[in-house]
Image: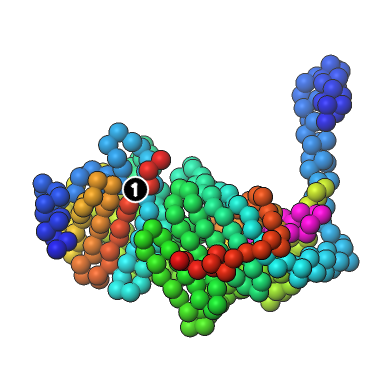
Amino acid sequence: MISIFCALALPNATAQTDYPLLLAGSDHARWNFTLERGTLSLTGICLVRQTDEGLVGSVVNEFGIRAFDFTCCGDKVRVMNVLPQMNKWYIRRLLRADLRLLAADKAVEPGKRRQLCSYLPDSLLLNNLKYHINYRFERIKE
Amino acid sequence: MKLLTKYIQSLCHLPLGRLGGAFLLCFFVSCGTAAAQQPATPEQQAQLISEINAAAKDIQTLQCDFTQTKTLSIMNDKMVSQGAMTFAQPAKLRWRYTTPYDYTFIISDDKVHIAKGSKRNSIDIKSSQVFQEIVRLMAGSVTGRCLTQTKDFSVKMLIAEKSYIAVLTPKDKQLKKMFQTIRLTFDRARKIVTTVEMTEATGDATVIEFQHIQQNKPVSAKAFSLD
């Protein structure tokens, strides 16, 4: 069902647009963020801002506790200041690869392992099909 | 302050010039700042913790609004959230964010209830040691009883003009990785927490300021359910 929505919502559902995390004409955005895997669900806020080098972002939970920061220059994503409980090399590697679809400054082919959808005007859904992880973003209107 | 300013201005006209006046101003300001927060002696610290603990035992309910400001240096930005808090002894807590997001966190009857938008989730505290620790820390921070939880934190008390400040340094390895220090500011007269400041290892801080604090007013049991 989600695949059908994705195909209808995006004229070219196989490649992302530039900076999906930013609205056209804006250099910053805030999103309600949910990370889901099976029954596990983590929520928080994702803040992103455009810089001269690319994109910089931070994911914090509602209490202000930081999950991680990330930067993207070109299509190279760095993840840093990761919450100790999440600070494993394989988690950082996964986040880098997944965030690349959202933070790179040029269209990145999602490939067979990932799917990026925009199913409402202010929502994004990134699926990691291999590890069954969903990243949901719902824009916080300012 | 006006007299001090006039004095400094008068110094600026001396042969020392403006640079000398500025140096003296900095000297006076730093002395003033140092005097504003004096470390408590061991005896004073023990006395203050005892008084705060006694005041905490008198807290049956607390209600207040809060403003939370999170500094994000990598973003060169701050995230400001607002909401309301309700607390009832022994450990019932309702923490609700109203702007810019709608998020409710309730601790009640050995369960944690979370609501964000239309999504709801309930977790049994007894099944998770992590949540038991979170509940203990949150209830302890709101009332100030965490000052006596010496296995979790080392405590240093500071005395300011209108407040007492407890600087808590985590002892637990995992908590140390997350927080450098947690500062609780207590109103000197009421001995209740007015500000919580959590400084991360990166130097970024989350500051929660409580406003319109009401103590021991009746609280409905419905406040601690998501219904």
On screen, residue B20 versus residue B211, left or right, reads right
Q: Report the residue marked by disc 1.
A: A139
Q: Is residue B187 magenta?
A: yes
B116 or A39: nearer the viewer? B116
In the rendered image, residue B213, in percent from the top left (x then y), is placed at: 68, 54
Chain ID at mark 1: A
On screen, residue B174 versus residue A116, left or right, reads right
In the rendered image, residue A90, in percent from the top left (x then y), is placed at: 34, 69
Q: Residue furthest bottom?
A: B127
Residue B162 position (above or below residue B91): above
Q: Quadrant of residue A78?
A: bottom left
B161 or A69: nearer the viewer? B161
Q: Report whether residue A84 is seen.
A: no
Total numbered labels = 1
Q: Report whether residue A124 is seen.
A: yes
Q: Quadrant of residue A26?
A: top left
SS for callout 1: strand
Say what amino acid the circle numbered 1 marks. Answer: Arg
| Quadrant of the rendering where the N terminus of chain A is positioned | bottom left
Residue B87 position (above or below residue B131): above
On screen, residue A68 versus residue A19, left or right, reads right
**Residue at the location (78% across, 59% down)?**
B191
On screen, residue A116 versus residue A55, left or right, reads left
Q: Quadrant of residue A131?
A: bottom left
In the rendered image, residue B52, in percent from the top left (x then y), is placed at: 79, 65
Q: From which residue to which does the magenta span run?
A: B181-192
In the rendered image, residue A123, in percent from the top left (x then y), is placed at: 28, 51
Residue A110 position (above or below residue A87): above
**Residue at the location (30% across, 58% down)?**
A136
Q: Residue furthest right?
A: B43
**Residue at the location (73% across, 66% down)?**
B59
Q: Is residue B171 magenta?
A: no
